[in-house]
Image (cartoon, rainbow, N blue to C red):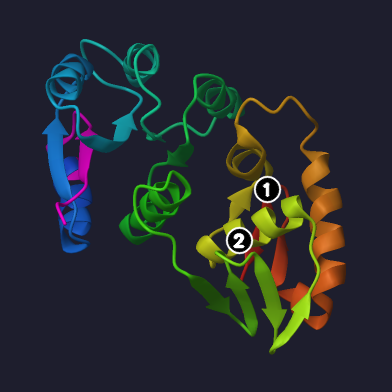
Amino acid sequence: MSKLKILVVDDESRMRKLVKDFLVKQNYEVLEAGDGSEALDLFFADQDIALIILDVMMPKMDGWQVCREVRNYSKVPIIMLTARTDERDELQGFQLGVDEYIAKPFSPKILVARVEAILRRTNQIAADAVLSYGGISIDQAAHVVMIDGKTIDLSFKEFELLTYFMENKGIALSREKILNSVWNYDYFGDARTIDTHVKKLRSKLGEKGDLIKTVWGMGYKLEI
């Protein structure tokens, strides 16, 4: 099976090398671009790019411009990197169709985990048949959730929400990221809908509901 290609776009060569090294270790092929113009040239020259990791602040053409151009032709997954933590930037990214939004500095291991989660969601790499963590088991093919061997009933959205938590275990997830990933970025609802679903999910998980931790002022994290 051929390696999936990931385009890493950042004007800092050290940052590109850091990200590339971690991705190559996970058996991805990595293409590099040092500015937005070069990124578009590479993207349109190679139709097999599976995902783009895109810095916001770059010379010649910034990440927002690149994202707009790509979205005119493709739904390829895009992860935006930025040194800024302005909520307006994050919302703009989701409105443009960005799949993930990660603030610098970040853990390369977390970035790779996000890459793999997105590629699973977009069916570019096979989803694990069974996800298991902390006594919770999800059979994705059969759409069955078990706790310590006993089946529990979840609604479709509760199942998707728990699956997203399991795929991103140990990672703090903002309400906006959860809405973007589980409800899709073009969902025009209130982020508080996340709180309602998490409350119901915790209740159905019983004691295991305590694994879903509240990250105050941000969102949630699944962690033992």
Magenta stretch, residue numbers: 1-15
Picture residue at 82% right of the left edge, 42% below the top: 193
Crowding near the residue tagged with mark 2, few <14, some 14–19, many ≥20 C-alpha atoms within 10 Å:
many
For label 2, the SS is: helix
Picture residue at 14% right of the left edge, 27% below the top: 46
Q: Is residue 131 left or right of residue 34?
A: right
Picture residue at 41% right of the left edge, 48% below the top: 123
Residue 47: horizontal and vertical position, in percent? 19, 27
Considering only vertical position in the picture, is 169 above or below 17?
A: below
Q: Is residue 22 left or right of residue 199?
A: left
Taking the magenta stretch, the answer to whether it contains residue 199 is no
Q: Earlier in the sequence, mark 1 or mark 2?
A: 2
The Cα–Cα distance between marks 1 and 2, rounded to whole angstroms, is: 19 Å
Q: Is residue 106 left or right of residue 21?
A: right
Residue 151: horizontal and vertical position, in percent? 75, 79
Residue 82: horizontal and vertical position, in percent? 40, 33
Residue 137: horizontal and vertical position, in percent? 61, 77
For label 1, the SS is: loop
Q: Tell me the amino acid under the disc marked 1.
A: Met
Between 193 and 60, the one lying in front of the other is 193
Q: Residue furthest bottom?
A: 148
Taking the magenta stretch, the answer to whether it contains residue 12 is yes
Tell me where residue 11 sits by quadrant: top left
Label 1 belongs to which residue?
218
Q: Which dot marks residue 163?
A: 2
Considering only vertical position in the picture, is 146 above or below 72?
A: below
Quadrant holding the N terminus: bottom left
Q: Tell me the amino acid under the disc marked 2.
A: Thr
